[in-house]
């Protein structure tokens, strides 16, 4: 035995002991895995399966392949609402990308100033709307923007902009933009905090060196800070994309399931709700609802894959 040990050959019992899978890891992971499987993986797989079935007058379901997707994309009874919801969702996402993330970047830059006093108070106040219920946010803004008893018109009158006030939530041309800006106001704290954390991780030596070399505040931001936070901006962008194409609650709280006026605020989430559960005169269809949900999943997957393979690889070189 001593000769075997001297040659570096370990006993079989010791090799077996090291190669065994640590059971305590499986014990700790099992509850989370079971819950995730039951409430996430199984409903997702079953939704995709249901999208390949169609129901008849008796309620029986039979396999129909891709016919539901063909109906969704080409049938005038479905395609018009689907493409309208997709277009509105793209507008909803674009407003968040430009306005929300732009304001979040600006606020993060201001909060990262070394001479700023009361920064923790400002961060709390700016992040506070994110923690409020979407139903409360929708109800409050409906009251504020109401043309009859809302205070928005009085506030604009006080600053000389009363002529710009209108029933923004009741007009087709402004309803979607108004709801989008309400959502921006509520969730701007999330990109602000993520970008703020990234700015704090930039070493002061780099900023001091750029200042010593004669770079002004704008040059320091553009050539030093911005390249170093590009990976964080990419993460913020993809989180915004996924959240906006899963959005439902704020539109439902403010404009209801019909997403009025005349479906001008209808997005994929509200369209899915009406399709699956039915609303007023529209009869719910679980198979078509599953088809809409699967289409939403495909859209989100395409966006995520574009980010992973088209954006993230280019951002890796900027990782500090």
Image (cartoon, rainbow, N blue to C red):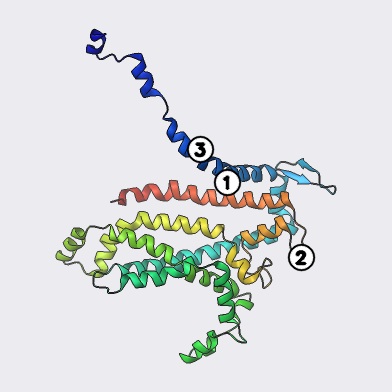
Q: Nearer the viewer, residue 3 or 156?
A: 3
Q: Nearer the viewer, residue 7 or 229?
A: 7
Tell me the SS state at disc 3: helix
Residue tagged by mark 1?
Answer: 40
Residue 196, percent from left and from top: 34, 63
The residue mark sitting in front, 3 or 2, is 3
The residue mark sitting in front, 2 or 1, is 1
Position of 296 with respect to 113 (left or right) is: right
What is the residue that sits farthest to the left in this orientation?
212
Q: CA distance from mark 3 to mark 1?
A: 15 Å
Among the two numbered marks 3 and 2 on one chain, the one whose residue lies closer to the N terminus: 3
Residue tagged by mark 2?
Answer: 280
Tell me the SS state at disc 1: helix
Residue sitting at x 35%, y 19%: 15
Residue sitting at x 52%, y 89%: 154
Vertical placement of 192 versus 59: above or below? below
Residue tagged by mark 3?
Answer: 30
């Amino acid at each position: 035995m001593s000769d075997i040990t001297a040659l570096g050959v370990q006993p079989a019992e010791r090799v077996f002991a090291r190669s065994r899978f640590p059971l305590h890891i499986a014990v700790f992971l099992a509850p989370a895995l079971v819950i995730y499987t039951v409430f996430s993986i199984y409903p997702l797989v079953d939704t995709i399966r249901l999208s390949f079935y169609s129901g008849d007058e008796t309620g029986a379901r039979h396999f129909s392949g891709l016919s539901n997707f063909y109906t969704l994309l080409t049938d005038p009874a479905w395609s018009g609402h689907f493409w309208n919801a997709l277009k509105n969702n793209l507008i909803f996402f674009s407003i968040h990308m430009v306005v929300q993330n732009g304001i979040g970047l600006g606020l993060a830059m201001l909060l990262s100033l070394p001479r700023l006093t009361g920064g923790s108070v400002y961060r709390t106040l700016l992040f506070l709307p994110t923690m409020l219920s979407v139903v409360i946010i929708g109800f409050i803004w409906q009251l504020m923007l109401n043309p009859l008893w809302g205070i928005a018109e009085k506030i604009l009158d006080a600053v000389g902009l009363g002529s710009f006030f209108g029933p923004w939530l009741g007009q087709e041309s402004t309803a979607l933009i108004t709801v989008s800006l309400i959502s921006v106001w509520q969730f701007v704290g999330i990109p602000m905090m993520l970008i703020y954390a990234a700015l704090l991780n930039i070493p002061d030596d780099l900023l001091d060196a750029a200042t010593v070399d004669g770079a002004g505040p704008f040059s320091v931001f553009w050539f030093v800070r911005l390249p170093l936070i590009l990976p964080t901006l990419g993460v913020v962008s993809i989180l915004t994309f996924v959240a906006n194409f899963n959005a439902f609650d704020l539109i439902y709280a403010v404009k209801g399931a019909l997403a009025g006026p005349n479906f001008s605020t209808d997005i994929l989430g509200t369209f899915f709700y009406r399709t699956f559960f039915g609303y007023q005169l529209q009869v719910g269809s679980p198979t078509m609802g599953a088809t809409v949900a699967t289409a939403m999943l495909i859209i989100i997957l395409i966006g995520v894959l574009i980010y992973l393979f088209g954006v993230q690889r280019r951002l890796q070189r900027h990782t500090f």
